[in-house]
Amino acid sequence: MNAAEIARDVSARRVSAAEVTAATLARVQAVDGDVGAYLTLLGEIARSSAARVDERIAAGEHLALAGVPIALKDNMCLEGARTTCASKILEHWIAPYTATAVARLLEAGAIPIGKANCDEFAMGSSCENSALGVTRNPYDLARVPGGSSGGSAAAVAAGEAAIGLGSDTGGSIREPAAFCNLVGFKPTYGRVSRYGLIAFASSLDQIGPLARSVEDAALAYDIMAGYDPMDATSLDRPVERTADSLRADLAGLRVGIVREFDTKALGERSDALYREAYRDLERLGAELVDVSLPTADYGLATYYLIAPAECSSNLARFDGVRYGLRVEGADVRAMYDNTRAAGFGPEVKRRILIGTHALSSGYYDAYYVRAQKARTLIARDFERAFAQCDLIACPAASCPAFVFAAKSDPYSMYLMDYYTIPMSLAGLPALSVPCGWTVPEGGNLPLPIGLQLCAPLFGEKLLLGAAAAYERATNHALAHPAQIGTVPA
Amino acid sequence: MTPDTIDIRYVATLARIALSDDEIERFSKELGELLGHVRALQELDTASVPATAQVVESRNVLREDVERPCLDREVVLDGAPQRQGGFFRVPRIIAE
């Protein structure tokens, strides 16, 4: 059942938040052994939240997310709950406060079901970098759910939550959404407060929803978005409501198709699906225009200097003193070295090392500053493109969900985010919406793929509105059920 | 741009991570390859391009200088690996 429907039914007292919560927890019991979406179940917190929501509804309050079960990516703090970042270094750490985005959803009546698995410190594209658990794709259990917000995606796809909260640094909401047949939405940088989101790359990190429909994503976004004095980078500008601006067609819109993103490289079937998606946009009234992002091809190189540089600085706080793990040594220096050696997994170490290198004396200008300049060029590419179009359409990921251990070479995993990284570097709002199914070579189950739509800065209303029109006209998400079984009402 | 080499031992010292010999070998290879890929940035003419640290509007953010409640000390210290009274306990830092 969709979040909007649950909220309507709970608000009208056709069903109670307690009943929805009990049914969701039962669903988790039934399927999470196979899916592995959650690292921590919040049974007690969920039940007490539901009781409070039912009291507030009985008292006549209007709650936009009344009784909506949500999954929280485990890099977001919830007071009193274990918050691990899927890392050994925080395996037993209990958050002392609640992230603003989470607090706003709970205040609106949402019920936190569990803390969802992710790649360690949100670094990865498959969830395989989690140090604490394996998450499987509900559409084919032999495959990854995508990442880094893979647990949140799998939870929603398997009916273990109606909305998943993710964070997107280079594609970590959009790619798992594409892999799990969901809508995954990364707002403009700064729209949603990062307070209580454990930092990976602070100039890129942004919280957003994963949901079964554009309407649900818009509903969650409307509640989370807006200035927060606790995050100095959150945008102090008015937020336009999006949930009541969902469009029926695309009349009058110019949609840019990126010349450099040739979908032929994605194989015959995916190429055909993306061409069909572009035709569908046209059929809905959009005018397709050819646009160029000449610097986008440098996105990956730019990102893999900037994000690790920021990561190496942010993760310096995990030093065995203030949070989580400590491994003793002969002196304080050895304690730091041993704690971080034991606490971080290989991908986190790789990124800290490359980031430290890029920021180190003698290399700073050659790597970090040069990447920051390339970032300017990429942002300028988008500015020029948006002079000719209102939205950009392109693939959300380089391929559908892959089998475990298929991308053992780090760079092949990095390539997964080829289409999502440029938007992240430019801070733009972008989403993935289901756009068809393909049976991959060697597989026998149909797998979803995602269409990425991107708007200019602050263009959330237009973006979600257009995505809703496309979703309504195509309904690709409903074409195939998940392998894990149909989602109960 | 400088050559695509990375002295993993030195960088690990800066990053405060103890690495095994296997890790040093593996990361030297993997990160050397990654530096080969990022070398592509040399092709861009960035001579007159300003650096972007953050994409959207940014300015100094100030708040009223008034007292506000902070996190509870006991709760915060409970999250630390070792505490002593109202403090984080750390290994000896200054030699005798």
Image (tube, rainbow, N blue to C red):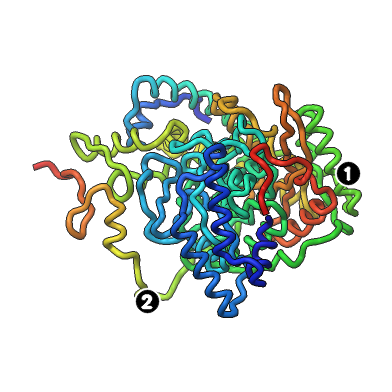
Q: Where, by quadrant of the figure, is residue B44 drawn? A: top right
Badge 2 is on which residue? B66
In front: mark 2 or mark 1? 1
Q: Nearer the viewer, residue B90 or A439?
A: A439
Residue A265 image point, x, y percent: 76, 28
Answer with left or right where residue A411 lies relative to residue A317.
right
Residue at point 53%, 24% (across, down):
B33
Residue at point 61%, 45% (across, down):
A153
Instruction: Decide: few, some or many residues near mark 2? Use Cα within 10 Å; few <14, some 14-19, many ≥20.
Output: few
Quadrant where the C terminus of chain A lies? bottom right
Secondary structure at numbered mark 2: loop
Asked if residue A31 can be seen in this view, the reply is yes
Residue at point 78%, 56% (across, down):
A468
Label 2 to label 1, Cα distance in Å? Answer: 57 Å
Q: Nearer the viewer, residue A457 or A157?
A: A157
- Most extreme residue toward the left, as rendered? B96
Q: Where, by quadrant of the figure, is residue A341 drawn? A: top left
Instruction: Decide: few, some or many residues near mark 1? Use Cα within 10 Å; few <14, some 14-19, many ≥20.
Output: some
Residue B43 image point, x, y percent: 64, 31
Asked if residue A306 can be seen in this view, the reply is no
Q: Amino acid at mark 2?
A: Val
Question: Which numbered disc covers residue A279?
Answer: 1
Dots 2 and 1: beta carbons under 8 Å? no
Secondary structure at numbered mark 1: helix
Mark 1 chain = A
Q: Where, by quadrant of the figure, is residue A315 drawn? A: top left
